[in-house]
Structures are given as C-alpha cells and as structure tokens.
Image: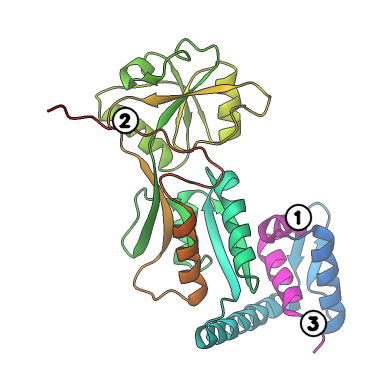
Amino acid sequence: MRFTLRQIEYFIATAECGSITLASERINISQPSISTAISQLEAELGAQLFLRRHAQGLSLTPVGRETLAEAKQLLEQAQGLYLRVSEATGLVQGNLSLGCLVTFAPMVLPQVAHSFSADYPNARVLPDVADHEVLLSKIERAELDVALTYDLQVPEGFEFTPLAALPPYAMVGQTHPLAGQSAITLEELADHNLILLDLPLSRDYFMGLFARSGLTPKISARLQHQDVIRTMVANNFGYTIANIRPRASAALDGRSVHKLRIAGEQMPMRLGLLRIAGRAPTRIVSTFIEHCASMISDSYIPGMEPPIMIPKRVERT
C-alpha cells in the first residue's frame, strides 16, 4: 500500500466540497498540494476518482463514490487508533475538528489553534468557521469535536463551558455626533441609524437589548459581514452594536471608529466551548478545553481588547 492517510484526507475533503478551491479553504492546504495528492492517489489505485469540469468543478465517478465510502471508514479507523493510543499512553495526539463562530474567528481562532498545536505537536487542529446554527448542526453530526461560540440558545443535548463575558458596546465613526461621549444610553442610540449585524441569533440578541427597554431602533441597514459594517460605521452611515472588541481601531479603509460603553446593566454574550453533552470527551478534546480555560477569561481574550465592563457601584456608609 503506497497511498497515505493525508492523500485520503485530501480526497475526502475535495469530494465533499466539490472543488479543490473549497477543499483548500476548508482544510487550509494549498490547492497544488491537494491536486497533486489526488493525482497520486488515482495513479496508485489505477482509477479515475473525479470528472474534471472547468465550469462545474469536480464530480465523483462511480468508482469515486465507492472509494469515498471506503475512504471515510479508513480515516475513521485511523483516527480511532490515534485516540486509543492517546488514551492508553496519555499522549495528546490525533485530529481535533474545531469550529469557531464567524464573528470572532479572525481574532480568537489563530492564537488558540496555534498555541494548542505548539503545546501539543502531535495534535493537529482542523478549523472550521460558521455561524452558530451551522456549528450546532455540525457538532450534532459529529463533524466537529468542539466549537468556540456564544451561549445563545444552546439546545438540550449540548454542553456549554463559559470562558468569558462580552458585554455589548456601541461603535460610531470618529465624527459621529455621539463620538465625544464616554458612555451612551440605549434611549440615545435609538434616535440614530443602526447598522444591524443580521446573523441568526445575533440579530435577536441585539434587538432584545432595545426591546427590554421598550425601545425600537431605527435600522438603516441589515448586513451579515462585520468588516463591511465596521467600514460603514467609520464612514458615518450609522452606528452598530457589537460584543467583540478587535484591537484594531480602524476599518479596512483606514478610517477610525470609536467605541462607547452602553450605560446600564446590559446582558452580555458569553464566549465559551460547545460540545455534545453526556459523552465523555476524548483526551485531545478535554486537553483542548483545559487549554482554552487557561488562556481565555474576562480579563484576556486572544486578539481582542479587554471588555468594557460596567463600573462597580461604590457603597457609601
């Protein structure tokens, strides 16, 4: 047998994604490496696994579909072998399928994944980025071992380990009428145009902040991409409300934004780890959970500024 498990992994990723380009993004491997691996696998097996159509991407041949089922079983058996050895020897090794919420992935995911791989060189982190609902679905289908996400509407059957609280804040352009204030009320914000992050669950959370105060915001735009929202805010199309606090104070076009604490006791989002409940974690998963707990807290979140916390009241006697 001259093919490798790495070639099998690249083949499965390409078959599931339908293109080498998407497979490259999914497993973070260069397109030429994937293409070469598949060609070598086809040569070793003596069979064409894909039909290559430039306009429509790749599709499996009949023998490719049969090979895919066998390849998945082979990879599962290999991963099971790593896990059994890991449990027996205490060595942390094998693949960790890690999901991360799209809204804070650019800040949190790189440092968390890199530091874990550096501490445990026999472990390989396979990252995936998606919205909260997709992460839930992938965890349920065992496509992800664990995910970094928020605690919004966690269904029964899932276990959430909180790591840090992220209170909401307002973001405005440097020349916005509210930019000179250190804190702002929801009542004051409601008089201005809101650019809403329109992602599943997130929009309900932001709208709920106003609803609990009996307010209705003036929504001027509903967008799903934070970088676009940030740039719109920097150009004074309106304000937005967010929970993550990137260290960068500028939008992608170089214009600056200003962060304002929202006065009052606002419900924070909690960043944490989500996985299936009632199932004992493997050694690599439990070690990753411990690793995250040691590096993420209310006072430190990778890639972010410390949260704007509500000042504690000083009781006078």
Residue positioned 71% across, 79% down in the render: 67
**Element on which disc 1 rests:** helix
Marking on residue 144 = none
Q: Please identify the quarter of the rendering in which residue 27 is found.
A: bottom right
Q: Quadrant of the C terminus?
A: top left
N-term-proximal mark, 2 vs 1: 1
| Left or right, residue 192 beside residue 21 | left
**Element on which disc 2 rests:** loop
Amino acid type of the residue tagged 1 in the rendering? Thr
The residue under label 3 is 3
Q: What stretch is highlighted in magenta?
A: 1-28
Q: Are marks 3 and 2 in contact (CB under 8 Å)?
A: no
Residue positioned 58% across, 20% down in the render: 234
Residue 125 in view of the camera: no
Residue positioned 79% across, 69% down in the render: 50
Marking on residue 21 = 1
Counting from the top left corner in percent of width and height, residue 139 is at 47, 64
Q: Which residue lies furthest to the front in this view?
A: 317
Q: How many marks?
A: 3
